[in-house]
Amino acid sequence: MFTIFLPIHIIVAILLILIVLLQQSKGGGLSPVLGGGQSVFGARGAASFLTKMTAVLAVLFMITSIILAISPRFRTSMGGIEDQLKKDLIPTETAPQIPEGTKIPPAPEGGGE
């Protein structure tokens, strides 16, 4: 599921960025640079179309984000990065246990140097 939704998520994110940049703001946006959308849709039609597309892409982006965030919880057979790290760990020796009642001498004043 992760491999299906990741490319979809990336495509939706790129399209969302482009649609937001195409919208005309007070500064004009990028629509004049890319040929403007008003010649095709008319003055009001472009704003309405781009607004609807932004809303649709934003909802798709949120849905794919939630799916990608939840999907690793259900991937038990494949394992994750944590399993790989645990497998590659080299076992280390543990420090010997000090029996109770043993007096530990205080550290030297000079820091042991």
Image: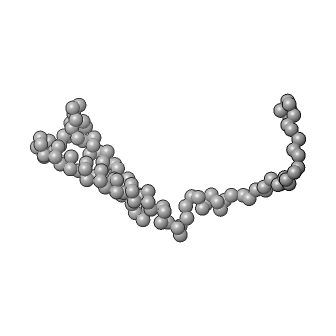
Instruction: Please state the horizontal and vertical placement of residue 14, each as a whole percent of the image.
Output: 34, 48
* Quadrant position of residue 26: top left
**Horizontal side, residue 37 vs residue 103: left or right:** left
Spot occupied by residue 62 in the image (x, y as percentages of width and height): 34, 53
Question: Residue 64 lies in what quarter of the image?
Answer: bottom left
Residue 82: image x %, image y %?
59, 58
Location of the C terminus by quadrant is top right
* Residue 24 % position (x, y): 21, 38
Way the structure is coloured: one colour
Residue 21 appears in the picture as rendered? yes
- Position of residue 56 relative to residue 2, above or below, is above
Q: Is residue 97 left or right of residue 51?
A: right
Q: Quadrant of residue 88?
A: bottom right
Residue that appears at 49% across and 66% down: 75
Horizontal side, residue 110 vs residue 35: left or right: right
Pick the residue in front: 36 or 105: 105
Q: Nearer the viewer, residue 94 or 4?
A: 94
Q: How many marks?
A: 0
Q: Residue at x 25, y 50 (%)?
A: 55
- Residue depicted at 87% across the width and 51% down the height: 101
Q: Is residue 75 above or below residue 90?
A: below
Quarter the N terminus occupies: bottom left
